[in-house]
Image (tube, helix red, strand yellow):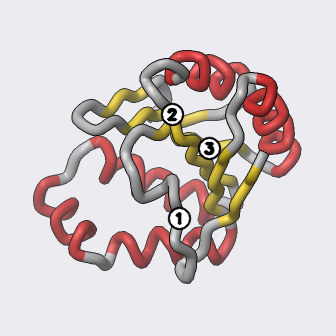
């Protein structure tokens, strides 16, 4: 299992693409439990945003061209990014997991069973919230 902490200088593979499940865990204990459960479910990649580095990554996205479009054409992804930024500022950990259509429901099930909140799925054409957004 590869868990990568993303910063403003990073080139994330997961956070910038569609077909992900994202959410928030309170601390590293919850993240460790989640990644262990995901590993058992066959997931091998997780990216995280936390602390100042995570806040800087989200701020960079907010002030990019994408952020400008979000301001005028806001959607669930925009709202999630705002919510995730607040969670990072509160010291929590935001995660993103790449998914396929075949493992999406299993990943969501594992994530929700492991104390994650604000769980969302971003697809190519459809975004879904799984509660608490």
What secondary structure is marked by label 1? loop
Residue lying farthest to the bottom in this orientation? 9
Q: Which class describes the residues within 10 Å of circle 2: few (<14), some (14-19), or many (20+)?
A: many
Residue 99 numbered tag: 2
Residue 11 in the image, given as x and y percentages of width and height:
52, 72
Q: Secondary structure at mark 3?
A: strand
Q: How far, Cα to Cα, is label 3 from label 1?
A: 17 Å
Q: How many marks?
A: 3
Which comes sooner in the sequence, label 3 or label 1? 1
**Quadrant (top left/top right/bottom left/bottom right) for the N terminus:** top right
* Local crowd size for mark 3, using a 10 Å CA cut-off: few (<14), some (14–19), many (≥20): many
Residue of label 3: 24
Compared to residue 42, the image places residue 118 above or below, namely below
Disc nearer the start of the sequence (1/2)? 1
Q: Residue at position x 23%, y 45% from top?
A: 75
In contact (CB < 8 Å): disc 1 and disc 2? no
In the image, residue 88 above or below residue 40? below
Residue 112 placed where, x, y %? Answer: 64, 23
Of circles 2 and 3, the one toward us is 2
Alpha carbon of mark 2 to alpha carbon of mark 3: how far? 17 Å
The residue at which mark 1 appears reads as 12
x and y percent of residue 83 in the render?
46, 51
């Amino acid at each position: 299992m590869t868990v990568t902490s993303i910063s403003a200088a990073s080139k994330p593979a997961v956070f910038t693409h569609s077909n992900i499940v994202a959410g928030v865990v309170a601390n590293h204990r919850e993240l460790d439990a989640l990644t262990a459960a995901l590993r058992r479910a066959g997931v091998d990649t997780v990216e995280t945003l936390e602390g100042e580095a995570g806040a800087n990554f989200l701020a960079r996205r907010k002030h990019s061209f994408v952020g400008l479009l979000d301001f005028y054409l806001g959607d669930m992804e925009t709202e999630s990014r705002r919510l995730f930024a607040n969670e990072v500022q509160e010291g929590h950990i935001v995660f993103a997991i790449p998914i396929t259509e075949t493992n999406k429901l299993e990943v969501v099930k594992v994530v929700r069973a492991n104390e994650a909140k604000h769980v969302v799925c971003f697809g190519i054409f459809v975004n879904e919230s799984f509660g608490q957004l």
